[in-house]
Image (tube, rainbow, N blue to C red):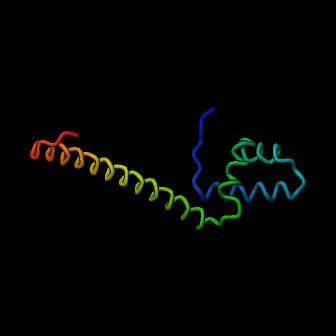
Amino acid sequence: MARKRFSAEQIVSKLREADVLLGQGLTVAVACKRLEITDKTYYRWRKEYGGLKVDQAKRLKELEKENARLKHLLAEAHLDKQMLQEIAGGWLRQRYALKW
Protein backbone atom coordinates (compact mmCIF):
# COMPACT_ATOMS: atom_id res chain seq x y z
CA MET A 1 0.00 0.00 0.00
CA ALA A 2 1.35 3.41 -0.98
CA ARG A 3 2.20 5.76 1.84
CA LYS A 4 0.38 9.08 1.83
CA ARG A 5 1.68 12.29 3.32
CA PHE A 6 -0.95 14.52 4.82
CA SER A 7 -0.57 18.21 5.52
CA ALA A 8 -1.29 19.60 8.96
CA GLU A 9 -4.62 20.99 7.71
CA GLN A 10 -5.66 17.62 6.33
CA ILE A 11 -4.73 15.88 9.57
CA VAL A 12 -6.76 18.30 11.67
CA SER A 13 -9.78 17.94 9.38
CA LYS A 14 -9.54 14.14 9.47
CA LEU A 15 -9.36 14.22 13.26
CA ARG A 16 -12.49 16.37 13.34
CA GLU A 17 -14.24 13.95 10.99
CA ALA A 18 -13.20 11.11 13.28
CA ASP A 19 -14.65 12.96 16.27
CA VAL A 20 -17.97 13.32 14.44
CA LEU A 21 -18.00 9.63 13.50
CA LEU A 22 -17.11 8.60 17.04
CA GLY A 23 -19.83 10.89 18.34
CA GLN A 24 -22.30 9.01 16.14
CA GLY A 25 -21.44 5.86 18.05
CA LEU A 26 -18.99 4.23 15.64
CA THR A 27 -15.90 2.46 16.91
CA VAL A 28 -12.41 3.80 16.30
CA ALA A 29 -11.69 0.97 13.87
CA VAL A 30 -14.75 1.74 11.74
CA ALA A 31 -14.10 5.48 11.81
CA CYS A 32 -10.50 4.95 10.73
CA LYS A 33 -11.59 2.67 7.93
CA ARG A 34 -13.94 5.39 6.63
CA LEU A 35 -11.16 7.95 6.84
CA GLU A 36 -8.75 5.52 5.12
CA ILE A 37 -6.16 5.62 7.88
CA THR A 38 -4.95 3.02 10.36
CA ASP A 39 -5.77 2.95 14.06
CA LYS A 40 -2.12 3.57 14.85
CA THR A 41 -2.08 6.66 12.65
CA TYR A 42 -5.25 7.97 14.28
CA TYR A 43 -3.81 7.64 17.80
CA ARG A 44 -0.47 9.15 16.76
CA TRP A 45 -2.22 12.12 15.13
CA ARG A 46 -4.53 12.57 18.11
CA LYS A 47 -1.53 12.61 20.43
CA GLU A 48 0.28 15.22 18.32
CA TYR A 49 -2.58 17.34 16.94
CA GLY A 50 -5.45 16.66 19.33
CA GLY A 51 -7.32 19.87 20.13
CA LEU A 52 -5.36 22.05 17.70
CA LYS A 53 -6.95 24.34 15.17
CA VAL A 54 -5.72 24.45 11.57
CA ASP A 55 -3.64 27.61 12.03
CA GLN A 56 -2.09 26.22 15.21
CA ALA A 57 -1.17 22.98 13.42
CA LYS A 58 0.46 24.97 10.62
CA ARG A 59 2.46 26.99 13.13
CA LEU A 60 3.53 23.80 14.91
CA LYS A 61 4.92 22.37 11.67
CA GLU A 62 6.74 25.63 10.89
CA LEU A 63 8.30 25.67 14.35
CA GLU A 64 9.39 22.04 14.03
CA LYS A 65 11.11 22.83 10.71
CA GLU A 66 12.82 25.89 12.17
CA ASN A 67 13.92 23.91 15.24
CA ALA A 68 15.47 21.20 13.03
CA ARG A 69 17.31 23.85 11.00
CA LEU A 70 18.65 25.53 14.13
CA LYS A 71 19.80 22.21 15.61
CA HIS A 72 21.68 21.51 12.37
CA LEU A 73 23.37 24.94 12.51
CA LEU A 74 24.32 24.41 16.17
CA ALA A 75 25.87 21.03 15.37
CA GLU A 76 27.93 22.60 12.57
CA ALA A 77 29.08 25.39 14.91
CA HIS A 78 30.20 22.84 17.51
CA LEU A 79 32.18 20.96 14.86
CA ASP A 80 33.84 24.19 13.70
CA LYS A 81 34.71 25.09 17.30
CA GLN A 82 36.19 21.65 17.93
CA MET A 83 38.32 21.85 14.77
CA LEU A 84 39.62 25.29 15.73
CA GLN A 85 40.48 24.10 19.23
CA GLU A 86 42.43 21.15 17.81
CA ILE A 87 44.31 23.41 15.41
CA ALA A 88 45.06 25.96 18.14
CA GLY A 89 46.12 23.22 20.53
CA GLY A 90 48.60 21.82 18.01
CA TRP A 91 49.99 25.26 17.30
CA LEU A 92 50.50 25.96 21.00
CA ARG A 93 52.30 22.67 21.53
CA GLN A 94 54.66 23.36 18.63
CA ARG A 95 55.24 26.97 19.61
CA TYR A 96 56.07 26.31 23.24
CA ALA A 97 57.18 22.68 22.98
CA LEU A 98 54.60 21.58 25.50
CA LYS A 99 54.05 17.92 26.16
CA TRP A 100 50.47 17.05 27.01
The quadrant holding residue 52 is bottom right
Q: Nearer the viewer, residue 69 or 37?
A: 69
Most extreme residue toward the left, as rendered? 95
Check the picture and name the quadrant holding the C terminus: top left
- In percent of width and height, residue 20 lies at 81, 59
Residue drawn at x 33%, y 51% as measured from the top left: 78
- In percent of width and height, residue 41 lies at 69, 45
Most extreme residue toward the top, as rendered? 1
Q: Is residue 88 above or below residue 53?
A: above
Q: Is residue 30 left or right of residue 94?
A: right
Q: Nearer the viewer, residue 55 or 80?
A: 80
The quadrant holding residue 32 is top right
Q: Is residue 85 left or right of residue 14?
A: left
Q: Is residue 2 left or right of residue 46?
A: left
Residue drawn at x 75%, y 57% as measured from the top left: 17
Residue drawn at x 31%, y 53% as measured from the top left: 77
The quadrant holding residue 36 is top right
Q: Is residue 73 left or right of residue 44?
A: left
Q: How many marks?
A: 0
Most extreme residue toward the right, as rendered? 25
Q: Nearer the viewer, residue 49 or 34?
A: 49
Check the picture and name the quadrant holding the N terminus: top right
- In percent of width and height, residue 93 lies at 15, 43
- In percent of width and height, residue 49 lies at 66, 58
